[in-house]
Image (cartoon, helix red, strand yellow):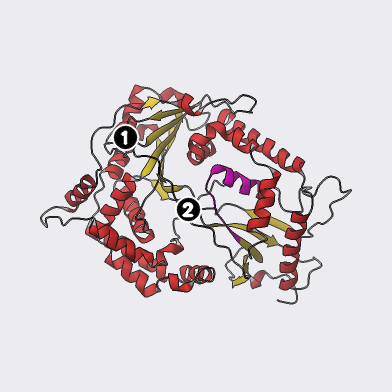
Amino acid sequence: MNYMQISTDKISFKGYVKRSQINRKTENQDVLQEPQELSNYEVGQAILNRNNISFRKIQKPIEVTEKYNKRIAGKDHLDLPNIHVYEYPDTNLQLFVNEVNKTTNKDFFNASLSFYDKGIKNDSVLKKNLLMALIRLSFNKNNINAQVDENYEKFLNIDLNCNISDLNKIGLLNKLITKPNFSESDLQLCKDKLINTVKSEKYQREMAEFKKLVEPSLFNTTADTIENIQNITLKDVYSYYSEILKNTEAQYAVTVDKSYVNEGFYSSLNVDLTNKFKKHSEKNVIYSEPVLNKEDIRNYDNNNESFLTFHYPVQVKSNKDFLTYKYLTFLEFFWREPYIAEDFAVQKYTLPMELKSSATNLNKLGYLNFSFVPKGNENIHSTEDAIVLFKALLETLHDEKLSDNTLESIKEQDKQFFDEQLNYKADSDLSHEIIKHYGKDIFKIYEIIDDIKIENIRDILEYIMLEQKPVITINEEKNPYNLKG
């Protein structure tokens, strides 16, 4: 099961959006001129300090596990004795410690530092890509093997896996995050790499597809985008980073063998963690509305793994949303599971080809993907026939009385999965991925699962997959039919 690892090689399409130019003006107005004699590091620290980012040793965290691990009367609940939650006083920083009895790699631990957008006002995709590249570069220079990425919920995520003897690397990572020291040469190196990506054939092909969904006038040209990248200064990056630290919540998740959890362990986690993640009132994050496409869009791409892939834009605002999409894919549309109601003697409609679904690319404006992998002996004679059949099956599924039993069976299996991975196989890398993904929601995961009803699946079918048209990616080299649509 893939818990949404988003490729860091891709740049968000929003890097082309023209409002990024407006953001730059707004941000530059907030940046005072610095004395020329200051070093890049001193300039960066001055900007962070001026933006109310204070630097002091963070206090010892206080355990608040019971705050989130509350059993509700009459509700099924997952007990997680291995997981402890701590909060740092007066900050937006939480610490999740997963204390496990490791059966393998006892001396190995996982650590993840995640930033959540809680109202970042002047977001900029280009600056974010440069910032992530600079962070990766600073890690590499300090021999830290860490992965930097993002997904639908986490604005920025850093993963570190290493031996317990290298626990001091946490302190170094803390320092690099809270007191960054980027150079002009490093910035130019990251700019060059970003520009090469923008120029690449793969990115241009993806961009052309996305432009079909959105008014083209909203986007910059490739030349304008490259110029915008070149115009970003080191001051811009530092100012942008201060905006993130002022308007984010941070979560450290650590999975480690119980034998190493002691006062010294917690002290090591706090080394050089001197940045105060500003405590602010709750802000309402405004999510962009999903793109509702009213016309079929066909994109011919022979690099696609399947003959036909249907992409439906989706929006994920919560873990309930994510699980609902996941269960939709678990149902394996019309073929492997008895998704049609049980009051039919046999399935009314079966699909004579293998239909695979994937939810691994979900993000705030991601895609729910369904791929045809035909065997070549179906009673279909063209690409057009396959497309028509797929849409007919969606309508058939929506019109029939859907079976609660199948969904309930999947939900019970998922509960067993969480119990097994977090209690009985808690020393696995997957248990860490689950905790990192769900955060404090992990304590009420059973309650979230129980809250998902068959009507939620019907809503997805109706509002996402019937009211809008898909983007259809066609790989003609894998076309098993004699005729082509």
Q: Residue at x 57, y 67 (%)?
A: 303
Q: Is residue 350 left or right of residue 197?
A: right
Q: Nearer the viewer, mark 2 or mark 1?
A: 2
Q: Residue at x 31, y 39 (%)?
A: 278
Q: Residue furthest right?
A: 345
Disc number at residue 287? Answer: 2
Q: Is residue 55 left or right of residue 200?
A: left
Q: Quadrant of residue 167?
A: top left
Q: Is 374 contained in the magenta span?
A: no
User: In which quadrant is the C terminus drawn?
Assistant: bottom right
For marks 2 and 1 on the same chain, the one whose residue lies earlier in the sequence: 1
Q: Is residue 234 above or below residue 379?
A: above
Residue marked by disc 1: 168
**Amino acid bearing label 1:** Asn
Pick the front one: 369 or 344: 344
Q: Is residue 349 left or right of residue 10?
A: right
- What residue range appears in magenta? 312-327
Pick the front one: 212 or 437: 212
**Amino acid bearing label 2:** Tyr
Q: Is residue 387 above or below residue 452?
A: below
